[in-house]
Image (spheres, rainbow, N blue to C red):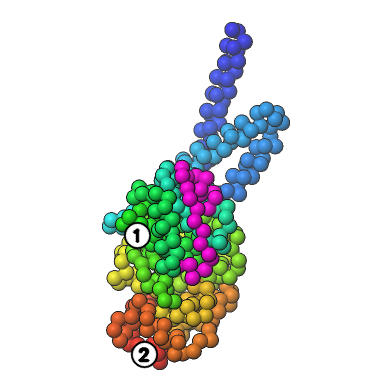
């Protein structure tokens, strides 16, 4: 019994010393939190934490307790993140941090609200942010690494993976019917859900399936391309193509949650990255002069998560003010009137086509600045198309109204305006 008491006394003394060290540690954590808040830095620094874990592993020679010490260190870091999030919960226009150090952007609409989760490795936290304790249909495509869908499936109580072919052609009535039939055959109910794990094609198709099945079931989105991460994954536009024309049949149907994991971009080829950057540049041109300058000086290459975050904040604000695109939201169509036609007729990637389209609907001063950024990113500046075919596609644009089309025009960086332009004038412009 004496040995037990002696051991307990040792632990009591060590705990007392550790309490003092813990107070000192949290004081230092507070200083770090203050610095990060002042300089708009994220709470989670994954590289720093990994370095601490590696160093911790070297400190303990006893293999029996090494793993326990590493868990102890990880626990301390989690406590530190939670304390920092408690001290400074708000960051940069409504971005929140949770105890994991993950960014949360809250989309607050009149009838719907959901969180956009942003951070590296967040796909592994799908079960934390999504309700997966039910039947889950995961819609992905053949161009997405299969391990992404499998990783989400491993977090689900009962999951089914449905893979479509890569490419815009998959946004079809045929695939729409096939997926609905698959769900009915596997007895999906109104309490189950659909998750898109892929780019804009997956998100649009899976979202429209969710909006339609049994008059609407829950939908979640995990975008895997830069373009879908900065734009199409939020806002609630879901659709399929019809007769070669983009997004002709669809709905406004908001997701219940979105996870944006920049690590998923590591498997993309350079053209997909360029396409996504073009869409983010569109956002900057219409609404954020500071983000445009980040593109102009080339620093966007060093912090892609910042580009994603600022793009999401732009779209969030616009969608919250105009969910159903009755006015301001049309600004997000900058470059799309010509861009959609170019995309359909050439097979060009969406972002590349929009980049071409933007050059037709801005002032000369804006055009010159855009072209300098196109050189940095590697975006196309033109496309060879028969003018009659191009004009025919434009006439079928959803933004057309009688003998005119509402276009988004940018005279000055960061300030877009909507102009109702006669169709003949657009033809002359082209």
Task: Residue at 37% x, 81% y: name it.
Answer: 396
Give coordinates of residue 326: x percent, y percent: 29, 70
Q: How crowded is mark 1: few (under 14 residues within 10 Å), some or many (20 or more)?
A: some
Horizontal side of 68 relative to 392 (left or right) equals: right
Instruction: List the single residue furthest toward the front.
Output: 185
Q: How many labels does the image show?
A: 2
Q: Which of the 4 image quarters holds residue 57?
A: top right
User: Position of 27 compared to 190: left or right?
Assistant: right
**Residue pictured at 45% horizontal, 72% vertical:** 282
In depth, the one of 24 and 395 nearer the eye is 395
For the N terminus, the image quarter is: top right
Report the span colored magenta: 149-171
Nearer to us in this view, 392 or 263? 392
Q: In which quarter of the image is the C terminus?
A: bottom left
Q: Vertical placement of 129 versus 293: above or below?
A: above
Please say whether residue 74 is visible from this viewpoint.
Answer: yes
- Provide the secondary structure element on which disc 2 rests: helix
Figure check: 344 above or below 126:
below
Find numbered disc 1 in the image and state the secondary structure of the residue it sits on: helix
- Residue 425 numbered tag: 2
What residue sits 52% from the left and 77% below the top?
347
Calculate the distance from the C-alpha at mark 2 to the C-alpha at mark 1: 39 Å
Query: In the rendering, at what x and y percent does residue 392 appear?
Result: 41, 86
From this view, report whether residue 186 is shown above or below residue 169.
Answer: above
N-term-proximal mark, 2 vs 1: 1
List the residue tagged with mark 1: 212
Name the residue: 44% across, 76% down.
244
Vertically, is 286 above or below 118? Answer: below
The magenta stretch spans residue 284: no
Say left or right for 328 vs 89. Answer: left
Quarter of the view holding residue 134: top left
């Amino acid at each position: 019994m004496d040995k037990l008491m002696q051991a307990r006394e040792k632990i009591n003394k060590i705990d007392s010393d550790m309490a003092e060290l813990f107070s000192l540690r949290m004081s230092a954590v507070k200083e770090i939190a203050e610095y990060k808040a002042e300089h708009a830095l994220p709470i989670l620094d994954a590289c720093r934490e990994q370095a601490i874990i590696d160093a911790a592993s070297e400190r303990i020679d006893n293999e029996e307790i090494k793993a326990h010490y590493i868990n102890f260190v990880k626990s301390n870091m989690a406590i530190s993140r939670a304390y920092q999030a408690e001290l400074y919960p708000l960051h940069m226009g409504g971005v929140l941090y949770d105890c994991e150090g993950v960014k949360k952007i809250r989309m607050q609409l009149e009838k719907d609200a959901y969180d956009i989760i942003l951070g590296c490795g967040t796909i592994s936290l799908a079960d934390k942010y999504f309700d997966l304790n039910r039947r889950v249909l995961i819609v992905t495509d053949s161009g997405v690494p299969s391990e992404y869908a499998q990783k989400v499936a491993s977090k689900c109580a009962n999951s089914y993976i449905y893979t479509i072919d890569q490419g815009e052609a998959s946004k079809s009535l045929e695939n729409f019917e096939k997926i609905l039939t698959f769900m009915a055959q596997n007895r999906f109910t109104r309490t189950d859900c659909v998750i898109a794990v892929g780019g804009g094609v997956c998100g649009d198709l899976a979202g429209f399936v969710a909006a339609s099945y049994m008059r609407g079931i829950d939908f979640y989105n995990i975008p895997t391309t830069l373009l879908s991460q900065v734009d199409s994954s939020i806002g609630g536009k879901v659709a399929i193509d019809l007769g070669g024309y983009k997004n002709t049949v669809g709905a406004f149907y908001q997701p219940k949650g979105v996870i944006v994991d920049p690590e998923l971009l590591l498997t993309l080829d350079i053209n997909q990255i360029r396409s996504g950057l073009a869409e983010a540049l569109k956002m900057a041109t219409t609404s954020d002069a500071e983000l445009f300058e980040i593109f102009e000086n080339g620093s966007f290459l060093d912090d892609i998560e910042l580009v994603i975050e600022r793009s999401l904040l732009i779209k969030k604000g616009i969608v919250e003010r105009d969910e159903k695109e009755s006015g301001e939201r049309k600004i997000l169509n900058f470059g799309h009137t010509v861009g959609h036609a170019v995309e359909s007729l050439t097979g060009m990637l969406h972002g590349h086509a929009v980049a071409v389209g933007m050059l037709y609907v801005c002032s000369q001063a804006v055009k010159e600045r855009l072209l300098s950024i196109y050189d940095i990113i590697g975006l196309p500046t033109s496309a060879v198309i028969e003018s009659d075919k191009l004009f025919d596609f434009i006439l079928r644009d959803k933004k057309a109204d009688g003998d005119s089309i509402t276009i988004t025009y940018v005279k000055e960086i960061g300030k877009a305006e909507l102009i109702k332009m006669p169709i003949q004038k657009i033809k002359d412009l082209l």
